[in-house]
Image: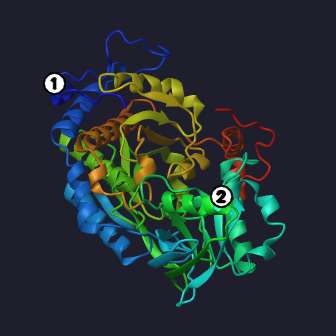
Amino acid sequence: MRKLLATVGVSVLGLSLACAGLARADERFKGPDEDGTKPALTKIAGEGMMNSHAFQYLTELSDNVGARVTGTPEAQKAIDWGIAKMRAIGLENVHAEKWQLWRGWKRGTADAELLSPTRHKLHVDAMGWTGSTPASGVEGEIVPMNLLDLEQETKDLSRLKGKIVLVVSKGTPKKSLDLIFADFGDFLRAAHKARALAVIGGQGGSKASGMNLTHTGILGFDADFAIPVVSMTAEDQGQLERYLDAGLNPRARLNIQNTFTDGPVESANVVGEIRGREHPDQVFVVGAHLDSWDLSEGSTDNGTGSASVLGAADAIVRSGMKPRRTIRFVLFTGEEQGLDGSFAYIKQHHAELANHLGDLVLDEGQGPVSEFQLGGRDDLISSFRPFATSLGNIREMKVDEKVESGTDTLPFSMAGLPGINMNQDSPDYRYTHHSAADALEAVKPDVLTQNATLMALTAFWIADRPERFATPWPAERTAKMLRAQGQYDLLKAFNLWPYGDLGAGEKPKED
């Protein structure tokens, strides 16, 4: 982790948004020193660093609203809170944009006990949108299933009847992890049909990280499963694996109770704007997802992103600076179920996407921003780098064209726009991600303040620079880019690929 800005005074009084002596990657492209945006950015930086409310917003969201699974009353409370905050900040056109989730789900109870060779409590939590055992629970022998050889494992599923399945990882993967994740959903449906009792298998079959932690989550895009699936602590799973490796046959009892709705449920994205002074019809979206999982407060996933969006909006409004183009702040819901809120946004705003410049998202945990990933738009790297270089007094920022498919940048990249991911240096995120450790204590106020300020500066620069930053690529070019970025197999596996044979023959880029 790079050292944070030493003093606030450096940021406000001596903030040089274009460090003298730092060579430009390409002198044809202008940064804040040359394009006239520096005075406004300096004022925004002052408000963002000296008068930040980002951690206050995060505290309210974490402690007063709490966990907010999409489609639940708690999620609606978060939506109402987001609307109230945007109005209090002074944003224009604040409203909720409703959309429907295919099915609602609510967590119940999850209890597990090892019966033999020894007897003790096992620590488990249900995966999202998974089913229940009978009310009295189930009891059975634990049998292994190798996640890295699903093709072989599924040749004889009859052996799973009346058994509790433990997902293990043995050997070398024969497919990408994305495709294994897709295949795992098919396995769960087949295991249920084969009358397996339950599956111990975390998100995509992965083992839990951290001390005595479980990690919940979805098991596909808009996917639900009738079979009970649980995440187990690494300590308990390790013991079970050792028994199996020793040729023993452990037995356990599980009682998992969750609730599905009978049909679709309503959710909404929260939207507010700073209208552009010259080109109000041209829109740059700044977003994060408001929904969370429910084992804790959802502070790092993605309370930090939501607080950064609100903190960025607040810093710009307080500065009194008006961008040339409209900045639209969006708190998406349904991200955890399959980027549903951002896909709904793209659908609802399809007619105006030609006037969009892209979107900017923060959703990588609690660490400092270290990189801008431009969502496949390699044509924008040269024009973006001078701005990234201008942030050198805060931190060196990398710029590349990578597509981040795991958050609300993906629908924009699929629409041919730059879905810009603010990648972060968050080594502890593996522990807080979807776990009981996802609480306010994991977040440092100074890091959040800086991230919110960087979001504000980036959004304003893109919206205010004299030249338009980006226009959407046509379908053919977008399809080629997505294939080159290695997104085709994932999108195809989850029935999200919209481009047919367009771009075929394009080879994925190697990392």
Query: Which quarter of the rendered picture does the C terminus lie within?
Result: top right
The residue where tag 2 is placed is 168
Q: Is residue 319 above or below residue 346?
A: above
Residue name at image x 35 percent, y 19 percent: 34
Residue name at image x 41 percent, y 27 percent: 397
User: 140 or 189, which lies in front?
Assistant: 140
User: 399 or 271, which lies in front?
Assistant: 399
Furthest-top residue in this view: 21
Name the amino acid type tagged 2. Answer: Val
How is the rendered protein coloured? rainbow
Q: Is residue 325 left or right of residue 239?
A: left
Residue 197 in view (yes/no): yes
The residue where tag 1 is placed is 13
Name the amino acid type tagged 1. Answer: Leu
Q: Is residue 230 above or below residue 416?
A: below
- Where on the picture, by quarter, is residue 146? bottom right
Query: Marks 1 and 2: in contact by CB < 8 Å?
Result: no
- Where on the picture, by quarter, is residue 424? top left
Q: Is residue 412 left or right of residue 10?
A: right
Q: Which mark is nearer the camera, 2 or 1?
A: 2
Secondary element type, mark 2? strand
Neighbour tally class for label 2: few under 14, some 14-19, many 20 plus, Cα within 10 Å: some
Residue name at image x 74 percent, y 80 percent: 161
Neighbour tally class for label 1: few under 14, some 14-19, many 20 plus, Cα within 10 Å: few
Q: Point out residue 455 in the picture as x, y percentages from the top left corner.
A: 35, 40
Q: CA distance from mark 2 to mark 1?
A: 55 Å
Q: Point out residue 81 in the picture as x, y percentages from the top left corner.
A: 27, 66
Furthest-right residue in this view: 155
User: 289 or 206, which lies in front?
Assistant: 206
- Where on the picture, by quarter, is residue 479? top right
Query: Which quarter of the rendered picture does the N terminus lie within?
Result: top left
Secondary element type, mark 1? loop
